Image (cartoon, rainbow, N blue to C red):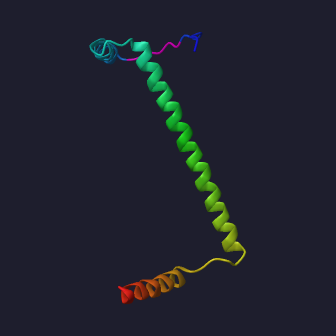
Amino acid sequence: MPKEAVFTMKLEAELREEFMAEAEAMHRPASQILRELMREFVQRQRTTREYDEFLSTKVDAARASLRAGRGRSNDEVEARFAKRRANAASKA
């Protein structure tokens, strides 16, 4: 991929010195490490955003279900699964 953009940033001198020393110790250009960090950040943010959108869709569907009267109270759910656990335990 051609490198056509320049990215300038301000940071503490000590952080820059430590970063440059670690990059040199790894025998890698600092710019390569920064590109990798940026790619990881972008991917992590996309994954987070996609999950948040998925979760929001699920919550909206659940709320619509409740408004339509298809919901169950916590007591109903607990009673149903207590019965299922009891049946499973009696078979074991």
Q: Residue furthest right?
A: 68
Q: Magenta stretch: dominant SS? A: loop
Q: Residue furthest front?
A: 91
**Residue occupying image coordinates x 64% and y 67%:** 62
Q: Nearer the viewer, residue 22 or 15?
A: 22
Up the image or down, 50 lies above or below 6; here it is below
Q: Is residue 56 left or right of residue 44?
A: right
**Residue occupying image coordinates x 67% and y 64%:** 61
Up the image or down, 33 lies above or below 74; here it is above
**Residue occupying image coordinates x 40% and y 17%:** 11
Q: Is residue 69 left or right of residue 30?
A: right
Quadrant for the C terminus in the image: bottom left
Residue 76 in the image, given as x and y percentages of width and height: 54, 84
Badge count: 0
Residue 74 in the image, given as x and y percentages of width and height: 52, 79
Inspect the magenta stretch and tell me whether residue 59 lies in it: no
**Residue occupying image coordinates x 46% and y 88%:** 83
Residue 54 in the image, given as x and y percentages of width and height: 61, 52
Residue 65 in which image quadrant: bottom right
Quadrant for the N terminus in the image: top right
Residue 26 in the image, given as x and y percentages of width and height: 30, 16
Up the image or down, 19 lies above or below 83; here it is above
Region of the chain picked out in magenta, as a range:
7-11
Q: Nearer the viewer, residue 11 or 58?
A: 58
Q: Is residue 9 left or right of residue 25?
A: right
